[in-house]
């Protein structure tokens, strides 16, 4: 991992976002967190993240809408995305395995930090 790898974390749950951001920062990542998905595009343009971690279910604009907005912007379209969701549990038969839903990689919000970090590394390797 490059110490200057920048992650844009987009999730409406402030407590969860702060906890995940703190853990990712302890792991050496530079993290910018936003809790209003309507500000995701503007923040991504200025922050220029290496990867975006996006909650699937949020008010006003869900994770799918955020991904569509990012992919619709030519300057941001190549940024890898990792979806987070509380709607699914980690697959007990393949713990830590990156799963796909609707063509997007996702991990459960209940996953261990190591699982999330490994998913980030996997997505960064797919650029």
Image (tube, grey):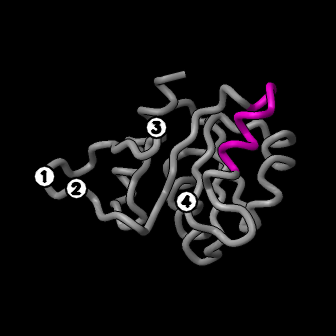
Q: Secondary structure at mark 2?
A: loop
Tell me, yes or no, whether the highlighted magenta stretch contains residue 43.
no
Closer to the observer: label 3 or label 4? 3
**Which mark is on residue 56?**
4
Q: Which residue is mark 3?
A: 103
Give residue 9's mark. Answer: none
Q: Nearer the viewer, residue 77 or 20?
A: 77
Q: Residue at x 57, y 60 (%)?
A: 55
The quarter of the picture where the C terminus appears is: top right
Q: Secondary structure at mark 1?
A: loop
Could you give the CA–CA distance between mark 3 and mark 4, rounded to whole angstroms? 13 Å
Front: mark 1 or 3: 3
Q: With 91 as the anchor, is 74 left or right in this view?
A: right
Q: Counting other residues with Cα less than 10 Å from the Cα at mark 2, is it few (<14), some (14-19), or many (20 or more)?
A: some
Q: What separation in Å lies between label 1 and label 2 (alpha carbons)?
A: 5 Å
Task: Identify residue for label 2.
Answer: 91
Q: Which residues are magenta?
A: 66-76
User: Which residue appears at 80% of the width and 25% of the height?
Assistant: 74
Instruction: Using the image, tell me which numbered label, if any, was put on residue 93.
Output: 1
How far apart are the two marked residues, 4 and 2, measured between alpha carbons?
18 Å
Is residue 80 in sight in this rendering? yes
- Which mark is first along the chain, 3 or 2? 2
Q: Position of residue 113 (x, y in %)?
A: 39, 57
Report, in whole angstroms, how far the alpha carbon at label 1 lies from the one at label 3.
Answer: 21 Å
- 68 sits left or right of 112 in the view: right
Q: Earlier in the sequence, mark 3 or mark 4?
A: 4
């Amino acid at each position: 991992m490059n110490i200057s790898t920048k992650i844009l974390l987009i999730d409406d749950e402030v407590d969860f976002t702060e906890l995940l951001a703190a853990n990712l920062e302890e792991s050496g990542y530079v993290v910018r967190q936003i809790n209003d998905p309507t500000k995701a595009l503007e923040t991504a343009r200025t922050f220029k993240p290496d990867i975006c971690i996006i909650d699937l279910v949020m008010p006003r604009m869900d994770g799918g809408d955020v991904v569509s907005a990012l992919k619709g912007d030519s300057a941001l379209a190549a940024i890898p995305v990792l979806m987070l969701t509380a709607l699914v549990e980690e697959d007990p038969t393949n713990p830590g395995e990156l799963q796909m839903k609707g063509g997007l990689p996702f991990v459960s919000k209940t996953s261990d930090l190591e699982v999330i970090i490994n998913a980030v590394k996997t997505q960064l390797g797919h650029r």
